[in-house]
Amino acid sequence: MRSIVPGPESPYTIDECKIRGEADLVIFPENAEDIAEVLRDAYGKSIPVTVSANRTGLCGGGVPDEGWVMSLEGMPGLIGMGQDDEGYYVRIGPGVSVRTLTDTMLLKRIEGLTDLTPDACGRFRRDPRRFFYPVDPTEMDGSVCGNIATNASGPRTLKYGPTRDWVRWIRVVLPDGRIIGIRRGEHHAEGRRFDCTVDDVHLSFDAPGYDFNTAVKNAAGLYAADGMDLIDLFIGSEGVLGVIAEAEVRLTEWHPLLSVIAFMPDDDSALSLIDDLRDSTVSPEFLEYFDCASIDLVRRVSAGDPTLLTPPEGRCSAVFLDMDAGDGARMRDLADIISSHGGSPSRTWAGSDAGDRRRMFEFRHCVPKSIFDYVAGLKEEMPAINKMGTDMSVPREQSPGMMSFYREKLEESGLEYVIFGHMGNFHPHVEIILKDMADLEKAREVYDVFAAEAVRRGGSPSAEHGIGKLKRRYIGMMYGSGGEEDIRRVKRYFDPGFILNRGDMVA
Amino acid sequence: MHSIGVFVKQVPDPSMVSVSESGTLQRDGVPSMLDPFGRMALMTALRFRQDAGGKVTAVTMGPDQAEEVLRRCLEFGADDAVLMTDRRFAGSDTIATSRALAALAKREGFDIVFCGMQATDGDTAQVPPELAALLGYGLYSYVSAIRDDGGIVATQCYERYEQDTVMELPAVVSVCRAPEGSPQLPSLEDRMRASAVPVRRVALDDIGLPDRMVGMKGSATRVVKVTAVPGRHADTVTVDGSDPDAGARAVLEEVGK
């Protein structure tokens, strides 16, 4: 098995949160048995092992504090294809990104995949319909298995739900090196009690006692519910219970989409438009919000980059959505609703062409990217500075109150900010534009106040980025010390030495 | 009122096309798009309409699915669209294509025709001059901008200079750039208007050309084989230049190898 000693600038000791870790060795397994060998070896020597794949995480989950890094980038990608009553599914390894999976399936370039059910590849190729994997975590270069380990979600969760809903089977290497395959529907808890045998491995333990909040978008802590499926314990577990070495994910039928960006006169008209569209006949796949400050930011960036779309002149907010392109009646309904909130169909972009849609998504991505670039620039002068963006969701009835709370606290603090993101799921990102280290201190205080308020309103302090190492304090905030200890107890059951992804989710 | 034709082409999205090891393009399942030069031609035609008045008709020749690019032209503001579709058109090279397009232009009574200077898939740049010759119209090549300045003035873009020409109609215009201020994307309003406009379909018999003038039969050229050209690779040799004479000799020696 290949391994390297990471240097000080190694890509294997950092992820997108840009906090640098430390490790003695990076090991590159090529299959599940290799993973098992590494873990058994590490267990014998009591060496912590941090798992990393494409290192697109935002909370330091794949950043090692010590010990070894196990990079899954050399693992298989696309493996095979099957078909059951619910449709086509694909077996994958950690070596495939969301983008590659989606593009390969849409273009049906499936040469080399094995048939998991008779003639599945041939039937898929001959099927006149097109299919895709609908989870869109925004970061398309992330590993699909990494997405499963973190139950990744994104804007399209509004229509398709999070990653969890699309996983039918996983193959997990447990921290002691045993390998189990868990198929959805085969192993359920009795209340919270699991007492089952999976591939000759007997499991007997209690899931955490708290109820995992599924009323809002939520990526904080282990999943837990009465009668829960064993597969759901591992999905979203951030790899603290085992390493996902293979998985089967479902595909769904693709249809042409119309992307729409409606420019609105002010922040409130955009928010009220989103609220109306959510339950309308338009049936949007996602609903993204940009406040006026976000659009101003895009305008400044696009002035220096002719490839980017330029927002219309004058101060405006915007609402971005995808909808079924084939339905004229829905398009007329959309135009009426936009007009009723003070917008105009002539000031609304509508693109169904692949190139147009790509540019509209670049427009959307321009907001977080320009903040990211801005902070990266600051880091040269102030190495300790970080991007400060929230990732909190609340229930629908709490959303207007939470939005007022954000604005009130930010105005009080005197910090500059933009608000944009997944308002379809009541999950905006508040990005604080830091100028100096004093701003960072203020922003940290405000951030914790926001997190506590989101929990108080029945929401999640980490809707999609997960907990990793950076947000561990929110586990106690959400589930109390009892809930935190429950997670530790389950972790200890699978991993008594806490060698796997040490420091993630719980310490 | 001017009758304005825009000839456009459906091409595979170049960002989705891959090249196989044997050098052939893999187009299967690749989404198609309005050729970027055709889009520039459409934008210039719409600007001409704004300055001089008239009706813009977008035209393409191809199978049923080529209707998509005409829908796109309508969404950007074209008034009308014609799909020239007939099995007998299949396999047309540039001259056979130009014959069919010229016959359609006559039938529609276009007094000005806009084309992209070339298409991104074939890259021949032959259709605009062929069309002009067949129709007996003036040809304005490589037009980067037009403006209303008493008459319609076209800016033609050449390698080392630009030339402003007052256009005389009838004319064929090949376009190399979209006018400044062209719409970035269709608006929802344009899209709704476009969805109510039908695409007219025209077959070979409708334009009154015999079979032998179009398709494979009417083509003067045939693609026999496509071969990938290997990229040029050059090794870099560093020559010590501290002694200019010795350095120059070393360079000559390397060049002579």
Image: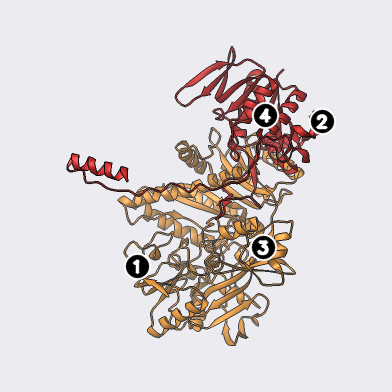
Chain colours: A orange, B red
> Residue A65 versus residue A354: which sits nearer the camera?
A354
Give me the chain letter of mark 3. Answer: A
On the picture, is A140 further left or further right than A470?
right
Label 2's element? helix
Label 3's element? loop
Residue at label 4?
B6
Give me the chain letter of mark 2. Answer: B
Give me the chain letter of mark 1. Answer: A
Residue at label 2?
B206
Is residue A242 in view?
no
- Name the residue rendered at 63%, 22% in the picture: B48
Which of discs 4 and 1 lies nearer the camera? The answer is 4
Vertical comparison of A311 with A100: above or below: above
- Name the residue rendered at 59%, 71% in the picture: A247
Dots 3, 4 in contact, CB < 8 A: no
Label 4's element? strand
**Residue B88, position in %: x, y?**
77, 39
Residue at label 1?
A6
Give me the chain letter of mark 4. Answer: B
Quote the CA–CA distance across marks 1 and 2: 71 Å
Which of discs 3 and 2 lies nearer the camera? The answer is 2
Which of discs 1 and 2 lies nearer the camera? The answer is 2
Quote the CA–CA distance across marks 3 and 1: 38 Å
Mark 1, Cα crowd under 10 Å, few <14 / some 14-19 / many 20+, is some
Q: For the residue marked with disc 1, what is the amino acid?
A: Pro
Q: Earlier in the sequence, mark 3 or mark 1?
A: 1
Q: For the residue marked with disc 3, what is the amino acid?
A: Leu
Dots 4, 2 in contact, CB < 8 A: no
Residue at label 3?
A251
